[in-house]
Amino acid sequence: EAGVVQSPRYKIIEKKQPVAFWCNPISGHNTLYWYLQNLGQGPELLIRYENEEAVDDSQLPKDRFSAERLKGVDSTLKIQPAELGDSAVYLCASSFGGQGTEAFFGQGTRLTVV
Amino acid sequence: AQKITQTQPGMFVQEKEAVTLDCTYDTSDQSYGLFWYKQPSSGEMIFLIYQGSYDEQNATEGRYSLNFQKARKSANLVISASQLGDSAMYFCAMREGGSYKLIFGSGTRLLVRP
C-alpha cells in the first residue's frame, strides 16, 4: 500500500513569489492534515480536512496561505506571497477512523525562501 | 501553555543498550491519546506506538514500549536493544479528547553509537 505522497520534496523560491505543495493521502483516509515544522521543533497543525471540508483551520495564516481538497482526496497548500519566515518543512498526513488511530505522514516538502 | 514537554534535546546510547526518552504532558481532559513518532533524516514521521488514557497496561510494539505513568503525566518511550538505525529525532505527541489535532513536543535527537 502506498503511503502519503508529497511533492515537491524541495522548493527554493524568492520572497514574494507564490508556491504550492501537493499531497496525495493514503487511499481511503478521510482525514487529511497539513503541518508546519520549523527547524528544531515539532510539527504544528495548519489545517485539517474531513473529506473535502476544512474543519480546523484556526492555525492557518489566511492572509497568505490557502488550501483546498477537491473531491476529498488530493490536497494542495498554497502560499502567496511567500516570506522569508515561511522557510520550513510542510508535512501532510492522513488518517482513518477515530482519535486513537495514528496519522501517517508524508516525507514533507522543504521550502526555502531566499 | 506547553502541552508536551521533552526535556532531552539530545541523547546518546550504545548499540544494543536500552534507552528511555522522556515525555511529560499537560491536559485537563480525562480522555486523550499519546503517540510517539520517529523522524529520520529523510523527513518522514514514522508512527511507533500509541497509549490511550484509559489503557491500563503499558503499550508495547516490538522493541518499543511506553512507560505510562498517569498520575505523573508522563509517557516515556523505552527502546530496547538499540540499533544504529534508531538514530533519529523522536517526537512525543498528544491528542486530547474531542480533538483530532496532534500536539507535538520539541523532540529528542537520539544517536546510537556503534
Image (cartoon, coloured by chain):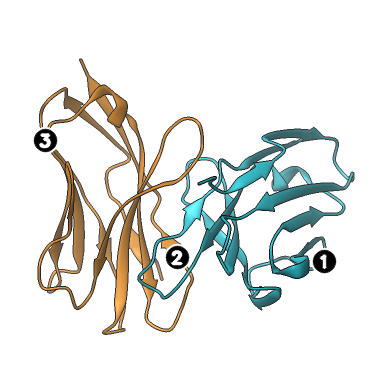
Chain colours: A cyan, B orange
Q: Residue at x 71, y 47 (%)?
A: A86
Q: Residue at x 60, y 64 (%)?
A: A32
Residue tagged by mark 2? Answer: B102
Give residue B39's mark.
none
Inter-mark Cα distance, 3 to 1? 47 Å
Do badges 3 and 2 share one subunit?
A: yes
Chain letter for mark 2, please: B
Residue tagged by mark 3? Answer: B18
Q: Amino acid at mark 1?
A: Asp
Residue tagged by mark 1? Answer: A63
Q: Is residue A111 left or right of residue B109?
A: right
Chain letter for mark 1, please: A
Q: Amino acid at mark 2?
A: Leu
Q: Is residue B88 left or right of residue B44?
A: left
**Dot 2 crowding, Cα within 10 Å, few <14, some 14–19, many 20+:** many
**Closer to us: mark 2 or mark 1?**
2
**Closer to us: mark 3 or mark 1?**
3
SS for callout 1: loop
Relative height, residue B68 to residue A55 (above, below): above
Q: Residue at x 36, y 66 (%)?
A: B94
Q: Position of residue B73 (x, y in %)?
A: 19, 69
Taking the view exactly as shown, the residue that stands out farthest to the top is B114
Chain letter for mark 3, please: B
